[in-house]
Each structure stands twice: as structure tokens, then as C-alpha cells.
Amino acid sequence: MRFNLNEEQLKEKALVIRRNIITMLAEAKSGHSGGPLSVTDFGTALFFNEANIKPEDPNWEDRDFILFSIGHVTPVIYSLMAEAGYFPRKDLLKFRDIEGHLQGHPSRHETPGIEVSSGSLGQGLSVAVGAALGFKLDNEDRRVFCIMGDGEQQEGQIWEAVMSASHFKLDNLVGIVDLNGLQIDGKTKDIMNIEPLADKYRTFGWHVIEIDGHDMKSILSAYNEARTIKEKPTVIIADTIMGKGVSMMEDDHKWHGMPPSKEQAEDILKELGTTYEGWKEYLESQ
Ligand SMILES: Cc1ncc(C[n+]2csc(CCOP(=O)(O)OP(=O)(O)O)c2C)c(N)n1
Ligand SMILES: [Mg+2]
């Protein structure tokens, strides 16, 4: 099933997701802020418009696969899952609680709806290729979406998977690269330049779509275009800003793996049009 939210509804949902991310991070007092906020807009469109999923039945046999190869972006993954109905919103307040089911990195053993445990960068696309190939061999009309980081593109294993995806003509596979220009220690271009990324994917036989990863119209048209491409995999290279939507965090790699303090979260939630206590109540009540 699809939620089929329209552009305006998706923008509203993305704001809700950003509020969830900030609140759960401040409550947990640990976790990643930057990447989750750069993924939020295309992630929201994926969950609420594009992917064929059934949150009340996470193992539904016709579902599309969504794999987050960047396992560290759990705040956005769990926020999307809670809003979609995989589990109650109040669970977000137990993020990173050792007794809870929402651990710092996603685990398929802990959280129904997580397809693949991840966190070790570079592996997700290989799993996605295997899943997409399996669906083809079984003549199943199911698609695979694999979300990767730009720093993650430095992993050699990615390129074996990129090569095999085009060899096997996996037009049911869509890769999405969160091109926020930053990784844990600084600028991707200084640490290990990955450019020209689009040319690399093209040369490896992929269909490439480059978009502004915060523009909902472009995001929706990229997903639409990907659906029409036959005989080859598609990668959407989403130009994003780490920490997008939160002025104190935007484009600063120090927020890669750091949560806001409670005081900072209070300011941020004001910037996002609500209050810390008010948003906690929203999460607690559902
Ligand atoms: C194999 C491996 N090496 C290192 C890490 C530690 N690590 C976690 S996230 C990250 C940065 C990845 O950069 P990027 O993919 O751009 O993600 P972003 O910082 O933009 O969220 C690193 C080095 C890891 N999780 N796995
Ligand atoms: Mg990055």
C-alpha cells in the first residue's frame, strides 16, 4: 500500500519528522543529528509516497525493501517508521535505551520492519543487489531502495555492488546517495574525493538522476523517473545539507554524531514551530 501524500502534505510530514528527530536525540542524550536531517526530505517522500509498504504487517510478502546502508541515521529511520505506523510514536522517547527496541543502529532482530541490520558502512548496496536479484529470479514485482552516504561511497565494496547491479540489469533497484558533502571528520572532498560521482555511476551502467535533495517537487519527479527506467538500475544523487532545517547544525560536520542538549533542543523546536515539552507530549500521547 502507499500513503500517496501530496507535495504539501509531504512537506508537513518532513517537518514532523525533524521535530521527532530533535526530541528523541535530546531525550537519548546521544546519537547522530546531521545525516538524519539531510535524509529527511527524500526519506519522507520514499515512505509516504513511493514505497509499497504495509507498516501494520512488516513482513507482508509483496512489500518493497527499504535498506538504510547508513545505519547511523536511525533517528530519521525510526521517526519515519513511527509516523508510518510500524510502532507507537512514544517508543521514540526510548531511543538508544538498552531495554528498548530502538537501538543506536538498526537491528532486524529488535525492530520489525528493519529489513537488514546495518551500521558497518559499504555493505548495504551488496545486500540490496542480492534482494533485487532474488525478486527478479522469483518473478516478483517488488522494488529495492538503498540509501547510502557520500562518505560511504569511499568504501570499495560499494563499487563491486554497483558493477553487479548493472550486470544483472536490476531495474528494480534504486540507490539514493545523500550527497551532503560531509562525513565524520570533515569535507568528503578533502578526506577522499568521490567526484565525479554521477559520471562514475554512469560509466558503471546506471541511470543517474541528480536533484536538489530538499526540493520536494524534484524528489517526487526523481522517484517517478526511476520507475520508468528499464534494464538498468537507477541512482538518485540527492544534493543535501547536513543538519538541514536546523540553523545551528547546517553544513557543520561536528553534528555528524552529536545530539543537541536539552537547552539546544528547546531553541531548535522553537525554530521548528513548536516547543520541547509540547512535542514530547505529542509523542507520549500516541
Ligand atoms: C566500515 C565503517 N567504517 C567507519 C564507520 C564509522 N562511521 C560511521 S558514519 C561515518 C561517516 C560516513 O560519512 P557519510 O556516509 O557521508 O555519512 P554522514 O556523515 O553524511 O551522515 C563513519 C566514518 C562505520 N560505521 N563503518
Ligand atoms: Mg555525508
Image: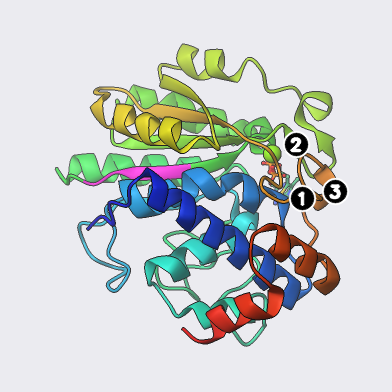
Which contiguous range is marked in magenta?
A: 142-146
Counting other residues with Cα less than 10 Å from the Cα at mark 2, is it few (<14), some (14-19), or many (20 or more)?
many
Q: Main secondary structure of the magenta part?
A: strand
Query: Which residue was labeled with disc 3?
Result: 254
Query: Could you tell me which residue is drawn at 39 percent across and 39 percent down?
Result: 129
Q: Could you tell me residue 106's position as x and y percent? A: 56, 64
Q: Eyeballing the image, is 156 above or below 29? A: above
Q: Could you tell me residue 155's position as x and y percent? A: 65, 35
Q: Eyeballing the image, is 93 above or below 186? A: below
Mark 2 residue type = Leu
Query: Could you tell me which residue is drawn at 29 percent across and 68 percent down?
Result: 59
Label 3: which secondary element: helix
Answer whether residue 221 is visible to the viewer in this image. Answer: yes
Label 1: which secondary element: loop
Answer whether residue 124 is visible to the viewer in this image. Answer: no
Query: Which residue was labeled with disc 1?
Result: 256
Q: Could you tell me residue 45's position as x and y percent? A: 41, 47
100 left or right of 108? right
Query: Which residue was labeled with disc 2?
Result: 182
Alpha carbons under labels 2 and 1: distance apart: 8 Å
The residue nearer to you, when weighing 228 against 40, is 40
Counting other residues with Cα less than 10 Å from the Cα at mark 3, is it few (<14), some (14-19), or many (20 or more)?
some
The residue nearer to you, when weighing 60 against 125, is 60
Residue 202 located within the stretch drawn in magenta? no
Query: Could you tell me which residue is drawn at 25 percent across and 55 percent down?
Result: 2
For disc 1, does the CB lie below 8 Å from ligand 1?
yes
For disc 2, does the CB lie below 8 Å from ligand 2?
yes
Residue 143 located within the stretch drawn in magenta? yes
Mark 3 residue type = Lys
